[in-house]
Amino acid sequence: MDRLIFDEEHEMFRDSVRSFMINEVQPHGEKWREQGIVDREAYLKAGEQGLLLMWADEKYGGAGVTDFRYEQILMEELTLHGEAGFFLWLHSRLVGPYIDEFGTDEQKDRWLPKCVSGESILAIAMTEPGAGSDLASIRSKAEDKGDHYLLNGAKTYISNGILADLVIVAARTDPENKRGISLFVVERGMDGFERGANLAKIGLKSQDTAELFFNNVKVPKENLLGQLHRGFYHMMHGLVEERLLAAVGFVANAEAAFKATMDYITERHAFGQPVAAFQNTRFKMADMRTEIDIAQAFVDQCVLQHNKGKLSAEDAAKAKLFTSELEGRVTDECLQLHGGAGYMDEYPISRMYTAARVSRIYAGSSEIMREIIARSIGLDPRKASS
């Protein structure tokens, strides 16, 4: 199905991004997966191409582009022609906007230019060993010591945990209020800030994921991001876009899996004919093509709504839920159609399959998405039980 949401300028941008991914990212994918981390140089090259924090004001080196369709194109081309573990979207659209939305002019002047250039890589540290989706259970704490905050605690499963130069850390500042959380920017080299090992994962091998430890870290007062005790609400602010970002990536991964499988089944022969000639194969591919097109149409409409500032939390949850579940079904079915070859690491479908498994967990699990959607249609258990 033709996608009608893009203009000529978007297609020109897509061509340039595709060229960048094919020439500067794709050739390094195997190396990055083996070493478990993307080379820092990749961020610098992306910065040179103007692909980082595209929304940032020109005075910080950005392009001032707020049209989310450009970010959508970047994610799609990264998935189709780049390397899934290269989390440009995390740096640019998930973490960077916290500085723009809640930072002071001094903080923006200090941090944004190097984030745009790729010299400073970003991460956000919310999840703890005992607190995942329930952010109100965060135990890390920051105590006001007059001219600084003393930060103590541990975070886990932090994407960009090894590479990050600036980490936005959520910590409790009001022990009497379960939502009394604040955000702090911890910088590489601060005393007491330590990183654990690069955690081994079943998928997204090139994406560095780590535990972070904060042992009496003296965080300057000027590194408080946003309002004191309002960090919980600051984190909620970006959830709609985070889930839309996720949905864009999930449907792109499903599309990539479909295309890889089309190539395989037309070339591979069994019992004297192409695998594509079997009715089961044709029907499976027809079903997947239909579902991917439907998902893409919904995500595209969500992008347009987001550009208008009208994308609701429940629609973002629907997009995240449907595309993550679809991605899981498609990559599983596509691996099956590859037969034994699909289980071999040399075939891209194997990596798409393992990468897809986390999609139903991060940015809010499928169960959390269903809860949001159910409450939006009036099925609130708190009201039903009263």
Image (cartoon, rainbow, N blue to C red):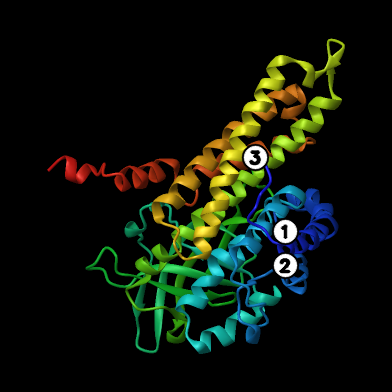
Question: Furthest residue to the top?
Answer: 271
**Residue 255, x across and y down, in percent:** 68, 41
Q: CA distance from mark 3 to mark 1?
A: 23 Å
Tell me the residue that label 2 is attached to: 43
Tell me the residue that label 1 is attached to: 38
**Residue 202, x across and y down, in percent:** 62, 40
Q: CA distance from mark 2 to mark 3?
A: 25 Å
Residues at discs 2 and 1 in contact (Cβ within 8 Å): yes
- Locate the C terminus and report the quarter of the image it occupies: top left
Figure check: 292 above or below 192: above
Figure check: 67 above or below 210: below
- Locate the N terminus and report the quarter of the image it occupies: top right
Q: Amino acid at mark 3?
A: Ala
Q: Amino acid at mark 1?
A: Val
Q: Amino acid at mark 2?
A: Tyr
Q: Earlier in the sequence, mark 3 or mark 1?
A: 1
- Residue at image location 33% in from the left, 57% down from the top: 137
Q: Could you tell me which secondary element the residue under label 3 belongs to?
A: helix
Would you say residue 96 is visible in this rendering? yes
Q: Residues within 10 Å of mark 2 (few under 14, many from 20)?
A: many
